[in-house]
């Protein structure tokens, strides 16, 4: 069995037997990895606390037949410690972990940009410089862009006309009057501007946005994300929304 080393973020864990856990990790070089951490549920475990969700960890693993095995783990940064005492930030972080797990489909397929986005998102949440839901929506939009699903925001998603009249999830973003399908949402132009700012990392514009536009943006982004994933993000039900 070959040994390898990588760094990653723990996305989730599940119990295995009486003392072990299966740990799902998004790693810098390896991509998504599912590995067994033996004995981590025992109080005498050397690295049990280092393999909890939100932890950015340096790992040594050896390749197994079905699941790899964690042999060493050293904490790089325990983002969970900064988020656990703040419910809005914790729930936003949980939604990030779930989204990363859903968007990165295959195991051991390089996903460096997804890894960097997740680490950057968790760091931004932990620093507390921006409203948690803004950080989460920015993460959603950028992750969708990396996956090839970025919404059209500057011109009609169907014909590229500059006149924007609505936002249609099934069409891929903003649409003009001629291409607008029945039931398309008609958000405020400021809401589309906020989505653009979050996608581009323009935090000055995002932080200056009004609460009603933030609420409308969050609803559109969540719906757009879940439509592309074809499944709901369960942790989103716990994310606190700003009043509109």
Image (tube, helix red, strand yellow):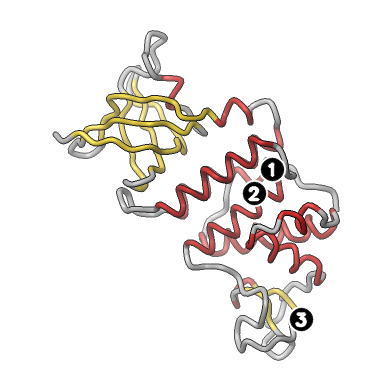
**Helix, strand or loop status at disc 2:** helix
Which quadrant does the C terminus fall into?
bottom right
Q: Which residue is mark 1?
A: 239
Label 1 close to label 2 by CB (< 8 Å): yes
Label number found at residue 136: 2
User: Residue 86 location, x and y as percent?
Assistant: 70, 30
Q: Marks 3 and 2, how far apart in space? A: 26 Å
Question: Label 1: few (<14), some or many (≥20) within 10 Å?
Answer: many
Question: Label 3: few (<14), some or many (≥20) within 10 Å?
Answer: many
Label 3 close to label 2 by CB (< 8 Å): no
Q: Which of marks 2 and 3 precedes in the sequence?
A: 2
- 40 vs 92, left or right, is left
Label 1 close to label 3 by CB (< 8 Å): no
How many numbered marks does the figure carry? 3
Which quadrant does the N terminus fall into?
top left
Question: 50 or 221: nearer the eye?
Answer: 50
Query: What residue do we see at 67% from left, 40% from top?
Result: 238
């Amino acid at each position: 069995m070959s040994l390898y080393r990588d760094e990653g973020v723990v996305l989730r864990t599940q119990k295995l037997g009486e003392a072990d856990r299966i740990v799902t990790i998004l790693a810098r070089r390896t991509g998504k990895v599912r590995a067994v951490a033996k004995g981590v549920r025992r109080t005498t475990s050397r690295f049990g606390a280092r393999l909890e969700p939100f932890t950015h960890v340096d790992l040594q693993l050896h390749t197994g037949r079905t699941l790899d095995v964690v042999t060493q783990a050293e904490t790089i940064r325990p983002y969970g410690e900064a988020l656990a005492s703040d419910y809005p930030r914790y729930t936003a972080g949980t939604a990030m972990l779930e989204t990363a797990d859903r968007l990165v489909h295959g195991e051991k397929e390089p996903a460096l940009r997804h890894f960097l986005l997740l680490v950057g998102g968790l760091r931004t949440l932990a620093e507390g410089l921006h409203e948690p839901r803004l950080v989460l929506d920015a993460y959603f939009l950028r992750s969708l862009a990396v996956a090839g699903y970025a919404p059209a925001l500057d011109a009609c998603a169907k014909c590229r006309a500059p006149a924007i009249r609505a936002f249609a999830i099934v069409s891929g973003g903003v649409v003009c009057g001629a291409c607008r399908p029945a039931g398309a949402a008609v958000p405020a132009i400021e809401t589309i501007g906020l989505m653009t700012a979050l996608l581009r990392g323009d935090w000055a514009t995002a932080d200056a946005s009004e609460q009603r536009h933030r609420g409308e943006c969050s609803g559109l982004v969540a719906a757009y994300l879940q439509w592309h994933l074809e499944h709901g993000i369960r942790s989103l039900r716990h994310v606190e929304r700003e009043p509109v």
